Image: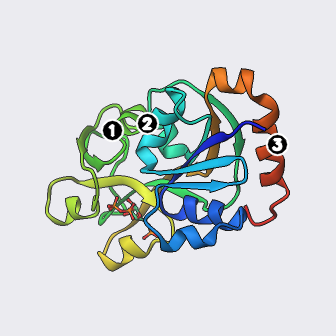
Amino acid sequence: MESITFALSKGRIAEAFLKAFDAEEALNSRKLIVQVGNIKMIMVKPVDVPTYVANGVADIGVVGRDVILESGESFYELLEFPFSKCTLSIAGFDQNINLEAPMTIATKYPKICKQYFPLSKTIYLNGSVELAPILNLSDVIFDIVETGTTLKENGLSVIKDVLSINPVLIANKSSYKFNQAQIDAVINQLNERGDL
Ligand code: PRP
């Protein structure tokens, strides 16, 4: 059987998939390519998963819906996973802030943010977004909340949950057409794993 290239988002998602495929030993290494049977897993930054898949370098990939919505790339969405659930939320200090009024929002997700808050000014940051309202760069942030620990430890709290986010399995359009049997075999393997 031909090999399938599977782009995994480094971090929580890659961890879950390497465990599901009994390849935990890769977690302790800096290897960027891990071969498991006929699946070549490549470890990439979440934001790059759509690029690898849309360009056909990876046949399939798994990445959060936040990254998918922010990416302008074209691919198929095959499956959404219930694990590693989080939300895209507005957070800040002032629970009474009028979210319908124009405000300044710091975010890693300017495109999604503009869709939900068209009147607001968005300030793009690449990380540590929680600093923005603390240092008066923005009124609020629009960011991923998983455990809530980062917000709590920085004195911020959720003002509004906007979107529920899960990992999504995506496929290159022509790969899916020509390698559907192999891709479906990977999906079956994933479906058999209760922990995903
Ligand atoms: C993400 C997100 C929050 C944090 C939320 O950041 O942007 O900062 O995780 O998780 P929590 O609710 O469990 O605390 P990430 O860890 O990707 O780092 P970053 O700040 O460099 O983007």
Callout 3: SS: helix
| Residue placed most toward the observer, 90 or 41 | 41
Q: Amino acid at mark 3?
A: Ala
In the image, residue 53 lies at what x, y percent? 54, 33
Classify the position of ligand 1 by quadrant: top left, top right, bottom left or bottom right.
bottom left
CA distance for labels 3 and 2: 29 Å
Q: Is residue 38 above or below residue 23?
A: above
- Which quadrant, please, contains the C terminus? bottom right
Of residues 172 and 143, which is closer to you in this image? 172
Task: Give the class, few, some or many, for how many residues have Cα within 10 Å of label 1's Cα (few <14, many ≥20).
Answer: some
Vertical arrangement, residue 29 with respect to residue 56, above or below: below
x 23%, y 54%: residue: 139
Tag shown at residue 185: 3
**In this view, the mark in front (2 or 1):** 2
Relative to 61, 133 lies left or right? left
User: Residue 154 at what x, y percent from top left?
Assistant: 29, 75
Alpha carbon of mark 1 to alpha carbon of mark 3: how far? Answer: 36 Å
Residue 138 in the image: state x and y as whole percent.
20, 52
Give yes or no for contact between labels 1 and 3 (Cβ–Cβ under 8 Å): no
Between the residue at mark 2 and the residue at mark 1, the CA separation in whole angstroms equals: 8 Å
How busy is the neighbourhood of tag 3: few (under 14 within 10 Å), some, or many (20 plus)? few
Residue 87 x %, y %: 53, 56
Q: Residues within 10 Å of mark 2 (few under 14, many from 20)?
A: some
Which residue is labeled 1 in the image?
A: 110
Give the number of the disc on residue 70: 2
Residue 180 to residue 107: above or below = above
- Residue type, label 1: Pro
Looking at marks 1 and 3 on the same chain, the residue that comes earlier in the sequence is marked by: 1
Q: Which mark lies nearer to you, 3 or 2?
A: 3
Q: Callout 1: helix, strand or loop?
A: helix
